[in-house]
Amino acid sequence: MSDAARPLRRIEIRQQNETLILQAAEKIFAEAGFGGATMQLIADMAGLPKANLHYYFPTKEALYRRVVQNIFEIWLHAAGSMDRAPGPVEGIGAYIDAKMEISRRHPDGSKVWASEVMHGAPVIQDYLETTLRDWTTGRAALIQRWIDEGKMAKVDPEHLLYMLWATTQHYADFGHQIETLNGGAPLTDAQWRAAKDSVKTMILRGIGAI
Amino acid sequence: MSDAARPLRRIEIRQQNETLILQAAEKIFAEAGFGGATMQLIADMAGLPKANLHYYFPTKEALYRRVVQNIFEIWLHAAGSMDRAPGPVEGIGAYIDAKMEISRRHPDGSKVWASEVMHGAPVIQDYLETTLRDWTTGRAALIQRWIDEGKMAKVDPEHLLYMLWATTQHYADFGHQIETLNGGAPLTDAQWRAAKDSVKTMILRGIGAI
DNA sequence: TCTTTTCCTGACCGTATGGTCAGGATGAAG
DNA sequence: CTTCATCCTGACCATACGGTCAGGAAAAGA
């Protein structure tokens, strides 16, 4: 009980509250969209007064921007799983694993990202044009190398990447639809494993890697 | 010129204005989301005074509901292309063609649909539980039949359907991202053909149909 | 022509929202 | 203990939004 009563240090306070706000914001933005989300809703979910949100984040846009940036970073981090692989089976397999795991662990983040892109990427357009474009070019070259080495069938690398993004993110973005078709229940551990296996098998066979 | 000046009949007026409003609404809802869209924006895009919108559609929700229903009907209509096919190559091939065409011709509708589902389907939950579930069950059975007949590999029919939806709709919902990665230009006719071919080839090979 | 029905719209209203601010509370520094 | 910087928040404000309504315009019907 001494631990709960101990006064927080400045840096702890700041970090704790920012995290609290960002988590609440991610959820509310995912559920209601940018326009439908209100600072009051986010404040209530974070358990803080609304004015306190404006102390840490000057505007709703600034808060939203931070949420989107956080997601993009998670996304980028997982993107590394494709490198350091001898071939498509390991590389693309690991990438599918990583992205499916994100869909499961951060469905709200995925939805905010999808929403942002669908609305024309008003906030992260510069990221799309720099970081994402560079990443895509690099991985397309990697896939092309695998094709040249005869490790997989001749496919268009960019469309393969789109298929990877679409298929894996679908389990987060359309999770509600999947849940409804699953009898209203969220996927169980076993079902998630089956989903991952299905996606991996179909895609790896689809690109002639197995 | 007599045609333009001819006074419109009642029914014509009603139909013309409803269409005008629904088209504008689809675009605005797709661009801004339900919460971000305003009746004023829709009215401006339709070229009508705001009060006129409320004459035809009592509330913003009612208008939105009609937009979503329209999309669902287009979607259902295309869904028939999978039937009347002797096997997966023709059936799933035709379905991919149809869905890619919808992504190209009705990207706004696709976005509104995606947004609706992402936010928990507040408006079309009943459709998901009835029409969509029935449709899914039926097509899953069809796919299972093809598997039993040895026309394709043993895959989970539901996850195959998810992959079909995800991959084809991605070209509409994430069209802005694709456009950005395409150097800022929309896909050309040839690029759309290449996309369709890539998707069809990868999926049909992925399910062992070719 | 006269009446009825439908269509149209400027002006208006109550509410909710993003954002502000003054002043108090609390931890850090000396 | 005193001073300072940071943290906190209830009350407030201007704006924008969804929706209403009275009354005029125009088509349909008789």
Image (spheres, coloured by chain):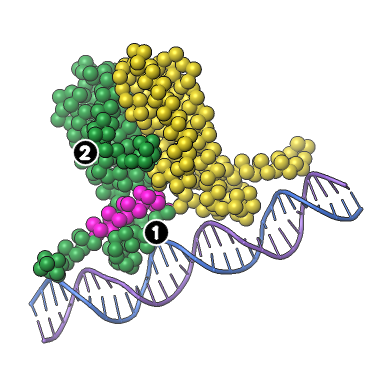
Chain colours: A green, B yellow, C blue, D purple
Q: Place residue B157 in its image quadrant.
A: top left
Towards the viewer: D15 or A95 = A95
Left or right position of B2 against A7: right
Whether residue A25 appears in this view of the structure is yes
In the image, what residue occupies the spot 49% across and 51% down?
B37
> Residue A130 or B131: which is nearer the viewer?
B131
Q: Is residue B88 left or right of residue A209?
A: right
Q: Chain of mark 2?
A: A
Please, what is the three-letter code of the amino acid marked with disc 1?
Answer: Thr
Circle 1 SS class: loop
**Mark 2, secondary structure of its residue:** helix
Q: Which residues are magenta?
A: A18-35
- The residue where tag 2 is placed is A78
Chain for numbered disc 1: A
Task: Judge whether residue A26 is colored magenta.
Answer: yes
Main secondary structure of the magenta stretch: helix
Q: In this rendering, would A93 be left or right of B69?
A: left
Q: Inspect the image, locate mark 2, and give the three-letter code of the amino acid beneath it.
A: Ala
Residue A38 tag number: 1
Instruction: Categorize mark 2 by other alpha carbons within 10 Å: few (<14), some (14-19), many (20+).
Output: some
The percent coordinates of residue B174 (x first, y second) are 39, 37
Distance from disc 1 to disc 2, alpha carbons, whole Å, reads 31 Å
Question: Residue A99 is drawn in which quadrant?
Answer: top left
